[in-house]
Amino acid sequence: MLRKATIDDAGKLGAVHVAAWRETYADILPDDMLAGLSIEARSVMWAKILGDPSAFAETAVYMIEDKDSIVGFGACGRQRASRLKELGFDAEISAIYVLRSQQRRGVGRALMREMAADIRSRGHKAAALWVLRDNAAAREFYRHLGGEVVAEKEDRREKVKLIEVAYGWRELSPLLSDPLSRNS
């Protein structure tokens, strides 16, 4: 079931956020960085975002549940990165994570479709997101959905230098197509 998240979902979002990071970045980020992730801290972060979306770039959070568990989620809102705004991307997808067990089943595509519809309903025309350059699976997913690399940046966290690339969609229609009409 795909639905908009509420503040009551903050704890579950925090747990799946940490789990997805540990799965996704196991071969990309240092083990100690992943081990230091806190479900409690992520839950507090999501509670703040869901409690006052206007304070966080008018963020909307969508999630997909299987029974009582969240298997994927995404967040979108107005563009916060000045560099991407200057390139014409007035909206952003600030997060999208799907548990590995649910990948290639249409979950990510359904989330992207829902976020694109949300973005368009707010009058935005184009969207972009940042992804780690070394996250090959996610980059292939974005390319498959019609995203194009539009920028690159370096980010330093703890003792790690991360290179991120931005994928952009100048037209949202490729993201709005029915997620069941393509292979997942």
Image (cartoon, rainbow, N blue to C red):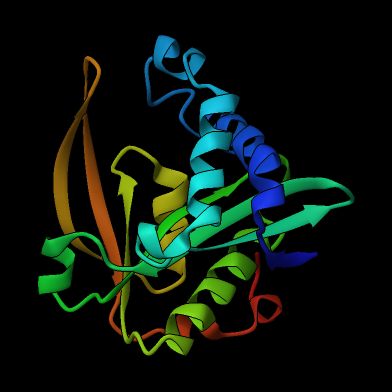
> In screen coordinates, is 128 left or right of 107?
left
> In screen coordinates, is 60 left or right of 87?
right
Image coordinates for residue 118, horizontal then vertical, percent? 51, 79
Q: Nearer the viewer, residue 178 or 17?
A: 17
Q: Is residue 124 above or below residue 17?
A: below
Q: Which residue is situated farthest in the top direction here?
A: 32
Who's the residue at 60% across and 66% down the image?
111
Who's the residue at 32% across and 87% down the image?
125
Q: Is residue 75 above or below residue 164?
A: below
Image coordinates for residue 22, horizontal then vertical, percent? 54, 26
Image coordinates for residue 67, horizontal then vertical, percent? 89, 51
Q: Which residue is situated farthest in the right direction here?
A: 67
> In screen coordinates, is 130 left or right of 99?
left
Who's the residue at 35% across and 63% down the image?
57
Q: Quadrant of the N terminus?
A: bottom right
> In screen coordinates, is 162 left or right of 127?
left
Residue 89: name its quadrant.
bottom left
Residue 103 in view in this figure: no
